[in-house]
């Protein structure tokens, strides 16, 4: 059977498509550098042995959730701590965020987290079909300039890959404080054959997910006057 992810031609390994800009900001402090050197290799997801399976990564058959672009890691660490019976994969390329997440993993003794430090698309493509029980994309870079829209993670191609990795009925949760990106995401989801959206009553999409706590980015947005967010939950058919 032909893999439709390949036929739609969205990922060429010879021309990798990046959804991020810079990888580093301020220099990591000594403790984070030590964690990058000593702890990260134990937790890093390798794509050499594809297809990836939850059992191979975690040594058990628990449900696996993915967070794409976890930023400072506060949401990912909180979810992993609250749900020790669930496995989590975090995908982030920014070294500052990776360092913070490693610190949380060490300090909170989180054994149910693995990290991928490269682009999310190759990770999704390497997964065994139906491996994921859910996925988060929370406050992604909106790439507001039209010429940069191709860097937005939500696209027909990335949704193909995500749909293949999600189990039927699995949730894809998306949050943003940028109305244009919310509209963009809804348009792409509604046009995609593998996702559905149970549209809530008008205005309910501004209500956070159950048990939600604001991320660092969200609090920054509020300070800067962006007082409205969109919290959208989609389902894999």
Image (tube, rainbow, N blue to C red):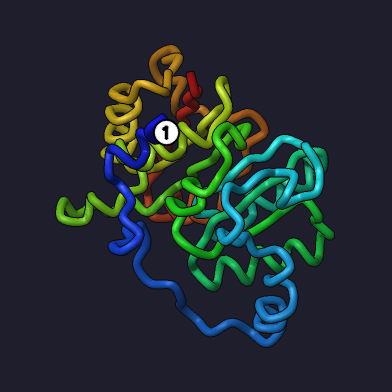
Q: Residue at x 39, y 42 (%)?
A: 177
Q: Residue at x 69, y 67 (%)?
A: 102
Above or below, 171 relative to 12: above
> In screen coordinates, is 215 left or right of 110?
left
Q: Residue furthest left?
A: 147
Instruction: Give the quadrant of residue 42.
Output: bottom right
Work out whether residue 90 can be spotted: yes
Q: How many marks?
A: 1
The 10 Å Cα crowd at callout 1, few under 14, some 14 to 19, many 20 or more, is many
Viewer-closest of 37 and 125 = 125
Q: Residue at x 63, y 28 (%)?
A: 210
> In screen coordinates, is 19 left or right of 25?
left
- Counting from the top left corner in percent of width and height, residue 12 is at 31, 55
Above or below, 26 relative to 2: below
Quarter that holds the N terminus? top left
Viewer-closest of 217 and 113 = 113
- Counting from the top left corner in percent of width and height, residue 228 is at 40, 37
Above or below, 2 relative to 98: above
Q: Residue at x 42, y 39 (%)?
A: 161
> In screen coordinates, is 211 left or right of 48?
right
- Counting from the top left corner in percent of width and height, residue 43 is at 70, 63
- Counting from the top left corner in percent of width and height, residue 45 is at 62, 59
Instruction: Give the quadrant of residue 103.
Output: bottom right
| Residue that carries the numbered disc 1 in the rendered image | 230
Element on which disc 1 rests:
strand
Viewer-closest of 182 and 227 = 182
Above or below, 49 relative to 36: above
Q: Residue furthest front?
A: 1
Work out whether residue 79 can be spotted: no
């Amino acid at each position: 059977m032909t893999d439709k992810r390949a036929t739609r031609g969205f990922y060429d390994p010879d021309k990798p498509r990046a959804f991020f800009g810079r990888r580093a900001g301020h220099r990591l402090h000594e403790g984070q550098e030590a964690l990058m050197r000593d702890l990260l290799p134990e937790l890093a997801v390798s794509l050499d042995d594809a297809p990836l399976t939850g059992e191979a990564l975690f040594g058990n058959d628990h449900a696996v959730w993915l967070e794409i672009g976890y930023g400072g890691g506060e949401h990912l660490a909180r979810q992993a701590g609250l749900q020790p019976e669930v496995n989590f994969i975090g995908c982030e390329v920014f070294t500052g965020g990776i360092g913070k997440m490693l610190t949380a993993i060490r300090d909170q003794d989180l054994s149910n987290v693995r990290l991928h430090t490269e682009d999310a698309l190759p990770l999704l493509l390497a997964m065994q079909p139906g491996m994921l029980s859910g996925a988060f994309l929370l406050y992604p870079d909106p790439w507001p300039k039209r010429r940069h829209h191709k860097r937005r993670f939500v696209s027909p191609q990335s949704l193909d890959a995500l749909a293949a990795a999600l189990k039927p009925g699995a949730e894809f949760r998306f949050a943003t404080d940028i109305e244009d990106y919310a509209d963009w995401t809804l348009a792409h989801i509604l046009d995609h054959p593998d996702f559905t959206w149970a549209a809530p009553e008008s205005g309910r999409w501004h209500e956070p997910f159950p048990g939600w706590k604001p991320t660092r980015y969200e609090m920054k947005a509020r300070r800067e006057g962006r007082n409205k967010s969109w919290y959208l939950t989609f389902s894999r058919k």
